[in-house]
Amino acid sequence: MSRISPFLWFDSEAQQAVEFYVSLFENSSITNMTRYPDGKTFGVSFVLDGLECQAMNAGQGHPFTDAISLFTRADTQDEIDRLWDAFSADGGEAGPCGWVKDRWGLWWQIVPPVLGQLLSGPDSEGAGRAMQAMMAMSKIDIAALQAAYDG
């Protein structure tokens, strides 16, 4: 068990957000929930694909920004598409270069491992083309990245 875990401040929908997050990733669950005296959710402890996390409903005034995001490996285009569609739905927002904001304002990076391989590949010109292609994308397209690398 790590001594460090992400802590997410929500206005009032921590439980709903966490239930959504754990539904998207294997090896995820809600492990504890605390409540205010009126019965509303105060805090949620959860595991997200093996990563222990905390969430709290603490009121307005501290919105998420793109200064922090959850980097999320997606091995296939189908996985990228599934996560992208889920996070961008219901008020989410597409960002650049594989970033997407969910309906609660939390930013996620949906990134295939092949991106790092192409950007650090032995063909520096191909890596440059792959970088240019990625910079023009919103949702990452693995086939387009590979085609750019290959020239």
Image (cartoon, grey):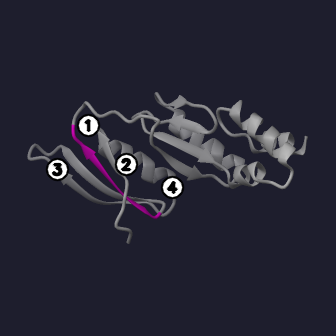
Badge 4 element: loop
Residue shown at 19% from the left, 54% from the top: 34
Residue lying farthest right? 151
For badge 3, the amino acid type reads: Arg
The one of 62 and 49 positioned closer to us in this rendering = 62
Residues at marks 3 and 4 touching, judged by CB atoms closer than 8 Å: no
Residue shown at 51% from the left, 38% from the top: 87
- The reply to whether residue 145 is visible in this rendering is yes
Reading the image, the residue beneath label 1 is 12
Residue lying farthest bottom? 1
Mark 2 vs mark 1: which is more N-terminal? 1
Reading the image, the residue beneath label 2 is 18
Mark 3 vs mark 1: which is more N-terminal? 1
Badge 3 element: strand
- For marks 2 and 1, give the CA distance: 12 Å
Reading the image, the residue beneath label 3 is 35
* Labelled disc at residue 25: 4
Residues at marks 2 and 3 touching, judged by CB atoms closer than 8 Å: no
Badge 4 density bin: few <14, some 14–19, many ≥20, Cα 10 Å: some
The one of 42 and 72 positioned closer to us in this rendering = 72
Q: Which of the 4 image quarters holds residue 68?
A: top left
The picture places residue 95, in percent across and down from the top left corner, at 57, 31
Mark 1 vs mark 4: which is more N-terminal? 1
The answer to whether residue 151 is left or right of residue 44 is: right
Q: Specify start and end residues of the magenta stretch as a single range.
A: 50-58
For badge 1, the amino acid type reads: Ser
- For marks 2 and 3, give the CA distance: 15 Å
For badge 4, the amino acid type reads: Phe
